[in-house]
Image (cartoon, rainbow, N blue to C red):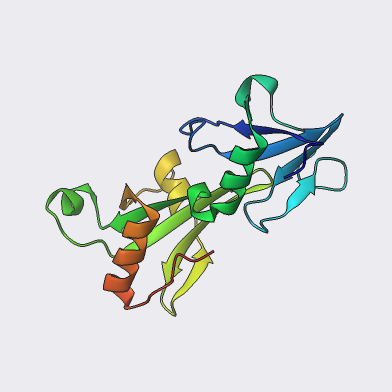
Amino acid sequence: MSEQYEYFVDTDPGYTVERPSSLWRRSGDSWEYLSLLTWEWCGVGQDNPVRMQPLPEALHPVTAERAKELEADRQGWVRYWAEYEDEAAWRDGEAPFSVVRRRRSPERIFDEAFMVGNTWEPTARVFDYFSARADELTYLAEVTPEEAERLLRQIRGVSGATDL
């Protein structure tokens, strides 16, 4: 981390300063964000998907040390959900049939499901669940990255599935 930058976290709805939605830095009038898809710092501007920095009221200053911790903790940026047939299956203690995740990067919200073939593939299931756009919704129960890893080992027999 460099002393030439001021660091900020963004807290979109459902996120906190401790678990923010994005990490930003500023040097003078130039803004950059940490891409949660490529894990690189990207400039804000005409040639990038993010053309503007977040609204000032959504930003919270953090120290360079805290920014370094956040940048290093890739799992801290990812939200995981166990996926069940429906809410009744979850309430009855049935095992989930899949795990889905979301990376909410400034340039794009990226939802994935762990699919047959043991790969993460893009999915609309998370978006559909939270926007109630699907007629037949499965039930999503948020889990920690460690729990997601354990579930994928149990469901698919795979270790390291949550590595980023």
Q: Nearer the viewer, residue 108 or 38?
A: 38
- The answer to whether any part of residue 127 appears in the image is yes
Left or right: residue 90 compared with residue 159: left
Q: Nearer the viewer, residue 86 or 18?
A: 18
Of 13 and 70, nearer the camera is 70
Residue lying at the far top of the rendered structure: 57
Residue under the image location 20 percent in, 62 percent down: 95
- At horizontal 54% and vertical 51% (from top left) the residue drawn is 103
Instruction: Residue 150 in the image: state x and y as whole percent.
Output: 30, 65
Query: Which quadrant of the figure contains the N terminus?
Result: top right
Q: Position of residue 145 (x, y in %)?
A: 39, 56
**In the figure, 66 relative to 42: above or below?**
above
Q: Nearer the viewer, residue 71 or 155?
A: 71
Above or below residue 22? Residue 140 is: below
Counting labels gives 0
Q: Position of residue 142 (x, y in %)?
A: 34, 47
Instruction: Please state, as top left, top right, bottom left or bottom right, where the C terminus lies in the image.
Output: bottom right
- What residue do we see at 64% from left, 48% from top? 108
Expressed as whole percent of the image width and height from the top left, the position of residue 9 reads 61, 33
Quarter of the view holding residue 40: bottom right
Look at the image and tell me whether residue 132 can be seen: no
Direction from residue 159 to residue 27 in the image, left or right: right
